[in-house]
Amino acid sequence: MIGRKKEQIILRNCLESPRAEFVVVYGRRRVGKTFLIKEYFNNSFAFYATGISNAKTKEQLKIFNGSLMEYGFSDKKQPKDWYEAFTRLKQLLLNENVRRDPVSGKKVVFLDELPWMDTVRSDFKSALEYFWNSFASTQNDLLLIVCGSATSWIINNLLGDRGGFYNRITRQIHLFPFTLKECEDLYRLNGVQMTRQQVIESYMVFGGIPYYLNCFDKRLSLAQNIDELLFKENGQLYYEYDMLLKSLFKNYERHAAIIDALAQSKCGMQRTDLAKIEKIGDGEPLTKALNELEQSGFIRKYKNYAKAKSKFYFQLIDPFMNFCFKFIKKRDYGSWMSYINTPSYFSWSGNAFELVCLLHVDQIKNALGISGVETMEYAWRSSKKENGAQIDLLIDRKDGVMNVCEIKYTLLPFEIDSKYELELKNKLAVFMSETNCNKALHLTMVSANGLKHNAHSGIVQNEISGEDLFS
């Protein structure tokens, strides 16, 4: 298994626990939640069932009962509601022949895509509450694992519940996309040969989503794989952009409109600006949609350094969604090859590399030798309309230093000339003037292929290369 070391430790601790465990696994769609659980337990479950997208309650119960019969329950008659379905699960688990983990002896129950089971006007959630509180929580040899891509449902109905699930969840696993290093390891495992430069560019397109990376054909180049997967109508990911939000959110049109708006604003937008867009609107629906997109990992909320708390910005940080908006949504060209080395490509690549860096702050800190230093990360933009400045990433450190990160994507080592040196000096001066920052500013150049040393490069205190992002 690639990566997931912390997650595997949590699962191992659950198996060794002397009490009943209720584990919630959540994360972005296609990030590998189901694979992690099935692979770790080698599909050796006492019971496994999965919800079905866009199915009604009757169909969900039919599928659930089919799983019960597969694991040894004899009654073929479909349960009339979820209370009866979970009663049957209880009876199955009390059977002395129920399958157990071969080492710990635990009975492992895995309910996949749980939010899809909770259909409109069904009694699913209350039945699950009753099953856990009245029976499962008293079984010291039981491990219940629930999983779902609809992160907002998981957070609102399980992790943040103030009713029957309050303080009932014993462990939670938020599964994040792979890092660059983990992507590289997965490519090697699959026999896909790439340079690290190409691994970075693949991350700029697909992010660290294992499902997407597993679609690669090892016989093809990166550019050819992008064409085959995204630009050809029979490609495995041809419809992924259209279906991604639909599969996660009810009334997804507002979410899609927010993504479209943020994809056109490199540094993000404030809530008040988003609310002015007709397809988005204001009020509670906007608040809910923003929270759901943030919880699902598509956007981030950040503060403009030294501004009031109300001045939050929302920024699109999902590389795949960003790429698809730029090149897939309109499909101006029939292949990725047609875009390479065009102005659109260069405009996208700079922004996309910034996203890669934002998603690898831990690796940047490690390269700076400050992995043990407490930090906060911001973006910053000047309030001046003329002669202002903008900083993509500030690493605010507890040791009296602030790293001002300049991020550049170039195929050769980045070269600072006299004009750019003046721009950097102006940026630092404007930042100091507007924020009254009392920390030492360390200008940090993050460049995909390093920094070319010349008469102007001395302005930089720290250099981070693409290689450092693989640490």
Image (cartoon, grey):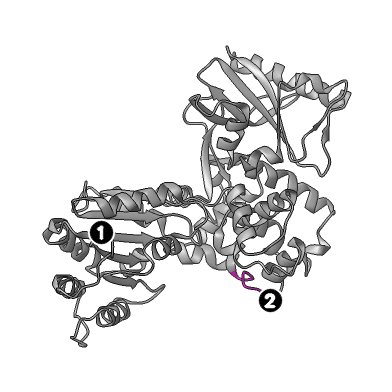
* Residue 119 seen by the camera: no
N-terminal of the pair, mark 1 or mark 2, is 1
Q: Residue at x 61, y 34 (%)?
A: 364
State the residue at coordinates (50%, 24%). 373
Q: Amino acid at mark 1?
A: Ser
**The C terminus is located in which quarter?**
top right
Q: Which mark is residue 233?
A: 2
Residue located at (59% from left, 37% from top): 363
Is label 1 in a helix, a strand or a loop? loop
15 to 450, vertically: above or below: below
Q: Is residue 33 magenta?
A: no
Looking at the picture, tell me which residue is in the foreground, 464 or 426: 464
Kind of residue at badge 2: Glu
- Give the magenta-colored segment's residue range: 233-239
Give the image location of residue 140, x and y in percent: 16, 56
The picture places residue 414, in percent across and down from the top left corner, at 81, 35
Please, is residue 232 above or below residue 214 in the view? below
Q: Which quadrant holds residue 384?
A: top right
Query: Which sits in the foreground, 296 or 288?
Result: 296
Relative to residue 345, is residue 431 drawn left or right? left
- Using the numbered discs, state the Cα–Cα distance from disc 1 to disc 2 in whole angstroms: 48 Å
Residue 363 vs residue 444, the one in the foreground: 363
Q: Residue at x 71, y 52 (%)?
A: 201
Residue picked out by circle 1: 104
Q: Position of residue 125 (x, y in %)?
A: 24, 63
**Residue 122 sits in quarter:** bottom left
| Spot occupied by residue 240 in the image (x, y as percentages of width and height) | 58, 67
- Mark 2 lies on a secondary structure that is loop
Q: Is residue 205 visible?
A: yes
